[in-house]
Image: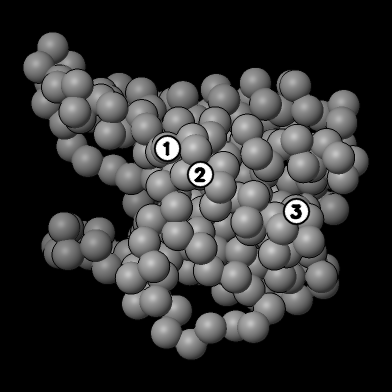
Amino acid sequence: MFDNKRVIVTGGAGALGGAVVNYYESKGAFVAILDYSDELLNASYPKKNDNNCYLSCDLTNRSSCENGLRTAIKQLGGIDILCNIAGGFMMGEDVHKTSDQTWDFLFDLNARSIMNAASTVVPSMLENNGGKIVNVAARAANAGLAKMGPYIASKAAVARLTESMAMELREQNINVNCVMPGIIDTPRNRSDMPDADFSKWVTPSNLANVIGFLTSDDAISVHGASIPVDGLS
């Protein structure tokens, strides 16, 4: 299905990013894996796949992000699919007590990284007459919760950016969609919530399957969708 497709996965050293990389590798794609340090990439991928490339950059910094993505596109020989997996969660203060540091951290990581990536990837996709982009929002973005205002706002921004990009790019044969996962079954989440029923959480591999569908030809008519992937949580 994805033989010889050229895929970029940001946040590729994380639990979900790794599952997405594995998904595309298993389907015959060439994958550029980006994360914020060589040390993290080496720890997550001690054995390198010769068909892939492994690049570090700061996705929250436009210059660093653009340099990393340009290198990835050059090494892949083009770009067909961008999976914006990089992102993060943290509890915050009450909204009226929210620090600039908390606000900037979450918006930079969850929303600015998508805009930075788009500034390089979209022009390349336009030159190639098409492409697929998937972002990661969150189920939590559907409603406000106490002490989660900045996180929820940043993930709601991801959904709205997805919709805006889809409207801007669908006539140019570029599909832009996002997934809205519930709690993902990662080692970090298990450590933070040891008493939870992990069987009800979304596995990274199942979420990767949905991301894969959104970048397949079967989803050619899907534009600007926010797909909930809740498991049983």
Quarter of the image for residue 203 reads bottom left
67 relative to 45 in the view: left or right: right
Q: Earlier in the sequence, mark 1 or mark 3?
A: 1
- Residue 184, horizontal then vertical, whole percent: 37, 57
- The residue that mark 1 highlights is 61
What is the crowding at mark 1: few (fewer than 14 residues within 10 Å), some, or many (at least 20)?
some
- The residue that mark 2 highlights is 65
Quarter of the image for residue 221 reads top right
Q: Which of these two is toward me, 105 or 211?
A: 105
- The residue that mark 3 highlights is 79
Residue shown at 36%/29% (left/top)? 107
The amino acid type, in three-letter code, at marker 3 is: Ile
Q: Which residue is most to the top?
A: 96
Q: Which of these two is toward me, 100 or 133?
A: 100
Asked which secondary structure carries label 1, the reply is loop
36 relative to 123 in the view: left or right: left
What mark, if any, has residue 139 been given in the picture? none
- Residue 95, horizontal then vertical, whole percent: 17, 16
The amino acid type, in three-letter code, at marker 2 is: Cys
Q: Are marks 2 and 1 in contact (CB under 8 Å)?
A: yes
What is the crowding at mark 3: few (fewer than 14 residues within 10 Å), some, or many (at least 20)?
many
- Residue 218, horizontal then vertical, whole percent: 83, 52
